[in-house]
Image (cartoon, helix red, strand yellow):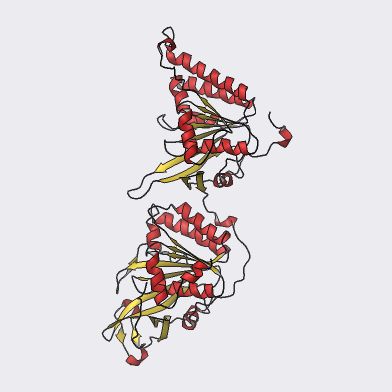
Amino acid sequence: MQPDAASQPTTASTGIAGLDDILNGGLTPERLYLVEGTPGTGKTTLGLGFLLTGAKVGESGLYITLAETENELRAVGKTHGWSLDPITVFEMVPADGLSDDQEQTLLHPSEVELGETIRAIMAKVDECRPARVVIDSLSELRLLAQSAIRYRRQILALKHFFSTRACTVLVLDDKSASGSDLQLHSIAHGVIALEQILSGFGAQRRRMHVVKLRGVRYRGGYHDFEIERGGLKIYPRLVAAEHGRSYVDAPVSTGSAGFDALLGGGLFPGTATLLTGPAGVGKTTATIQCMVALLRRGEKACYFLFDERLPTLLKRSAALGMDLQPFIDNGLLQMRAIDPAELSPGEFAGAVRAAVEEDGARLVAIDSLNAYLQSMPNEQFLVLQMHELLTYLGQHGVVSMLILGMHGIMGDIRADVDLSYLADTAVQLRYFEAFGEVRQAISVIKTRTAMHERVIREFQITAGGLVLGEPLRAFQGVLTGIPAYMGESSTLLASQSTDGGGG
């Protein structure tokens, strides 16, 4: 029995939180929607989840399958931990469909079979009186129709039939027709397109977008998703303007008085700090030191590690007097080792949002952007993605620390992509040669929040972390890697054992 119209919800949940967010709450009830995508994109999983979600709120569901058998559907449900008992499965693939008595010769088979199929669907709907219906798939009806005109008329007839039965209908289409089926798009109240993309290396990427949805201000653009146990996991495209909260913008210490002075007071909440430099110069160590200082104040942090192995990083940090394991054990620190070949940009943005909104992280570090770049189709998308992500973190008052490795050791060194204009603070770490030794220098190129020191300081990585020396005023051309010496060697730091190296 159908609920009264006055008690019906304004939207029908799809059962996927991310999709409901994209659709501004869900689907408008009692309309016909098209879900299209090539085989393997998750249409069947979406349809089953839609019906089971309705069953949880007392809405009866009917799954009409024109291709897969009921046993196959139940097997799909089992892989997701679902029982299909709460819904009705109507299999339109009769076991005796190939017997001799099913053949006829007076009419073309499709002319009879299409009419019989449509009538069988209508009869089953009248019998079950469902609130939600899924038809899988339209490709079978398209083949039976033989012509575009006949196909369109039959779909229009089905749409009119369902409108008189108060049904919310999803019709699935595997896009077997050549080109885009715009006729079907015009008939449906809404169209959701699922896509699967193969790259040269790594796992396939899945994404979806809403082609149309009448009367609803939905979130446009592509949204990454994965098929997981329990259904589809959709990551809505991040729109920073939709997020934000008040926060205290007092500077926080980096754990080093010299580094604080160089930055003009420390790190400011709501800002992004970019650390650039060649391999091994100390970018990771500087980031870890800033993070440990925050953790020791009892605040939470999240570190996304793309490059280094996590056990190696933990061991090296402990050797430098910055043991991270106690903070991991007490829940203040999350360390996530990321494989860029397996992670979509949308999933990464979702992980950052979860760290900030659910876990309360006040510092987010990304090490490094070079590996993250490999997960993006090209540099333009990386810049757009990072701009939105950094804006989002800034509006939440999070301290963002980004590491960008550069090619080369000295002289003309370059990065894969220039993201310095997105950062509020840019810190350069460089090697330079002096008196037969390779030394390290640090400088702040810009900061938008304070008057920073415009000097170049030598630094060393010691057992106590980063140690900054006096400004290198006796040298010219330090950032070129081969400076000219203009003073006394006593202005340099005494050589010390690093006990762990840079990063």
Give the residue at x 42% y 29%: 177
In depth, the one of 147 and 345 nearer the eye is 345
User: What residue occupies the far top of the structure in this picture?
Assistant: 106
Q: Height in image: 479 above or below 42? A: below
Residue 118 at what x, y percent from top left? 53, 20
Give the residue at x 37% y 56%: 374
Give the residue at x 44% y 12%: 102
Residue 175 at what x, y percent from top left? 43, 32
Q: Height in image: 433 above or below 47? A: below
Q: Height in image: 103 above or below 279? A: above
Residue 267 visible to the viewer: no
Drawn side of residue 9 relative to residue 435, left or right = right
User: What residue occupies the far left of the structure in this picture?
Assistant: 436
Residue 68 at what x, y percent from top left? 45, 29
In depth, the one of 336 and 141 nearer the eye is 336
In depth, the one of 271 and 364 nearer the eye is 364
Drawn side of residue 58 relative to residue 236, left or right = right
Figure quadrant of residue 245: bottom right
Residue 426 at what x, y percent from top left? 45, 71
Where is the N terminus found, in terms of image quarters?
top right
Where is the C terminus found, in terms of image quarters?
bottom left
Residue 432 visible to the viewer: yes
Question: Count of labels shown?
Answer: 0
Figure quadrant of residue 63: top right
Drawn side of residue 363 relative to residue 3, left or right = left
Drawn side of residue 121 relative to residue 437, left or right = right
Q: Height in image: 107 above or below 349? A: above
